[in-house]
Amino acid sequence: MHFLLIHCGNSLLIFWSILKCCRCTDPHHFSNILLFSPAGILLDIPLIPTVASLNLHCNHIPRIEGLTSAWHLRHLDLSSNCISKIEGLSSLTSLRTLNLSCNLITKVEALNGLVNLTRLNLSYNQINDLSGLLYLHGTEYKLKHLSLHSNYLDSIDHLLQCLLGIQGLREVILSQDGRDNPVCRSPGYREIVLRSLPQVSVLDGLNRLGNRSPQSLSSLCDIPGLEDYVDLLLSSDTSHNEPVRGDAPLTTPRIDQLLTQFRQRGATSEVITDPVTQPEPPRTQPVRSTVTDKGDPVNEERIRKLEHQMSQLIQQNPADNKSRRSAHSVVMVRKAKRDTDRTSESECDSGKENRRQTRIPKYHDSVTSSTTTKETKRSESTGSAEAVRPTRKGPLRAAKASGDMKTRSTEEEETYRTIVEERDQERERRWKAEQAVRKLTEELKCLQTKVSEEKDLQSMALHTTDRLKELLLKERSGHSELQARVEELEGRCRSLTQQLEQARSCEEQHKTALHRLEESVSHGEALRAHQQAEEIKRQQELQNKAAALKRELDIQRASVRQHKDKLQQLHELLAAREQEHRKQLELRLQPGGADFHDAVAKEVASVEERHSHREAELQEKLAEGRKQYTALEDEFRMALTIEAARFSEVKEACDQMTAELMELKATLAQSQERERKSGSLVQELTAMVKEQKSRISELIKAKRDAVTDLKSRLHSLEAEVGQDRHLGLQLELLKKDKARVLSQLMAQESVIDGLKVERKIWGQELAQQGASLAQDRGRLEARIEVLSAELEAQRKQNEKDNDTLRIKAKIMDDQTETIRRLKESLQERDDQIRRLKEEAAKAQKRLQEQLEEETTQQAELKERVEHLSLRKEELKQQLEDKEAELEQVKRVYSESTKKWQEKADLLTRLESQVKRMKENFDSRECLLLEEREKATEAHRAALEKLHCVDDAFRRQLESVQAAHQAELLGLANEKHQKIEEANQKVFEVEEEMRQLLEETETNKRIMEEKMKRLSSVLKDF
């Protein structure tokens, strides 16, 4: 294999030499082209953006990095390294071939930026995941050849899913040279893959019919450095394989003139010699063109005529018998050497020329025997064959030959030999001239077709540029509208974010208020629990005291009953004794006597003493009972005062609790109103968010519709372009056919003399047309590249817009998620508030129940106290006067008046607290209004900041566009340089053609000189 090493900038590019015998397009032949990085680190390589090919085979590179600046890199070879992950290739948009074989890769990824990639080699790795090929789906990507043999692919479903959307894929290699994947061992693997992937025509080196697929010349574009020479390779191959047609008839006026003179001389010699003594015709083999098996019938006919005339001249020679007697050996004519340099066509046909032989007539010595010779001549156009019939020679012919013709026959043989040699040389030169003329005519036709094609392309380019301009204007207007809509959406998003911030601040305030309420409720519950515990203790103490008082009352009642029983017994004893005394008095003494009176007096005195003594005892007992009763009354009064104080305290606590409950109810009502307001705000916010979502969805739908319309338009344009190309190809074929027919007609009618005159004109026209065509082609290519660059820029801008819209949609989704979370938190807080309300209601119910129980207990205590008071009143009625009762009533009245005064004081305090709460609420409302005004001012400031950011973004866009235009100018300059180089190549080709024309002219001059010599020799004869 021959290589060309070309230094371009600071990079080494290795090209294949353009040889006809070279047909190798396998990229594995480039494995040992260049070891560029001995250190094995890509960051140490000074890459220039103009590098087009880079080979880093077998350098122990661990990862792909440092290739972001090589934008124009087309061929990259990183085989036989230590790479375990595909990365750092997203910026190589011009890359066509990528070789990552013999590495440690396990997953295909990071290939979404390789738009122009046509050949990917991932063989001899550890790949089991092809999910990165999903990003190459669609018509934008150009992947055609994929090599995956010697990997770990075991899932045919995953393989088909990853390869199904690659529309340009033509060849897939999963098994080669005995190295395959686990997928290849599954039954029916080939049928399933070919059925599921209709775009694949070659699988594992075999086409759909099971035949070995030959590699076409289209893969030459994937060979580093051969992009600019593919057309030359194709043209050289077609020119080599095309059959050379002899179109123009060859006129030889001088040869015809010499032959007529020679015939006249032969006619004069026929008068002298006898026609019976004609020699045997030699067997000659006509020399044919080696290239044209089906040559021109006119030229072949003329050559046959010339040969026939030469054989007739030989037959008319009277001295042939002597030479036939003397010569017994067959002498072969030597082949004439060529004066011109050998071309590739002459080298290919040298074997056939060496096989051609021209024979000199044979002469036999036998007198009695006769030899018969036959000569067969084929005509390819007419199919007529002429055979020279054998003529028998008798002994009379040999006897009639004269001695003077011996020397003449030898001279004629030498002249014939020289004539035959010159004829062969002339045939070769004529053949070369015909081929050069045919090449020139074909190149002229090709140039004419190219001119027509370029004119068609120019018209199509103008038409497509107009359409593209219209599309660009429409896209710009749509882009401006989308930008305006995006700005409106951004403003709405900002307003919504501000409203969300306000809602969050309100929620925080509500949270703080709820925390305060919870703290106050917890504090109140703690106070209530403490008060309940104290009340329970007091109730227990009162119950204990009341039980003790009941016991004392029961004891006193029992003692009073005992005293009453004793008094009744005493009264009964007195009554019985009085009756007995009366009976005794009635029995013993009569009333009115002195003894009676003395006894009565004694008895009265004793009874009075006893009675006085008894009365004194009873009075002492009554005094003690009164003292005890007074003590009990004092104790009972003290207990009543204590209970009254406690009851007043409980009443005060109840009043405080009721006041606190009223305050809590008011705060709860306020909080409920605030919650309602916040709920209404949240509902409004959700409605606004829903509206904005609907609008955003409408905008996204409109954007998608616009994108789909643009894509459909692009597809329709591409279909129209494909139809136009198809029509252009058909027109080219028709034009080629027409040109061929016209060239055949013109070639049949034209003459070599006219071609001599037209060569100069054709040369000038070729030079002018080549220059003009090169200029037009350069302009059109520059224009096409500019338009393609603008299309790529528009596509990238559309992709960026789509990405921004996706990002904004994601932001809106995140905002909606935050709003949903806020709603959920609000719902949780509502649930907490409801729980708190329910707990407060339960606590109120409990307090009410406790109050009812306490009221029932107090009612029972009151009933008991009433019973005691009734009992006391009865005792007072028995023991004391009604004044004590009046004093007690006065005291109760004074105590009730004091309580009513205390309740009035509490009411005044509550009224003052309500006024204070109202004032605090008004101050909070003022603060909220001030905060609202501040929020509006912040909203305005945020809008101004957004306008500033938008202006900065526009400036950045303008700067990016200016940089893009500068890059386009640089690319145009580079293209202009390339066009100049191509023009230089065209000039060199034209110079070579001129040299060929000059050589043909020199050859023809030499041929004319030789013909002149031949004519002079014939004139001598």
Image (tube, helix red, strand yellow):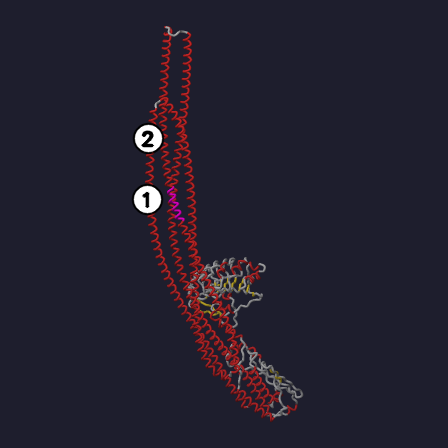
Find numbered disc 2 in the image and state the secondary structure of the residue it sits on.
helix
Amino acid under label 1? Glu
> In the image, what residue occupies the spot 57% across and 65% down?
208
Find numbered disc 1 in the image and state the secondary structure of the residue it sits on.
helix
Queried whether the magenta region covers residue 668, the answer comes back as yes
* Camera-side residue of 829 and 757: 829
Horizontal and vertical percent position of residue 555: 41, 23
CB atoms of marks 2 and 1 within 8 Å? no
> In the image, what residue occupies the spot 41% across and 19% down?
564
Q: Quadrant of residue 177?
A: bottom right
Amino acid under label 2? Ser
Image side of residue 266 versus residue 595, left or right:
right
If you read the primary sequence from the N terminus, does the residue marked by circle 2 or circle 1 appear first? 2
> In the image, what residue occupies the spot 40% across and 62% down?
480
Quadrant of the snapshot with the C terminus: bottom right
* Camera-side residue of 3 and 433: 433
- Span shown in magenta: 665-679
Is residue 296 shown above or below 505?
below
The label on residue 919 is: 1
Q: Could you tell me how far apart the alpha carbons at marks 2 and 1 are, in whole angstroms?
A: 38 Å
Residue to which mark 2 is pinned: 894
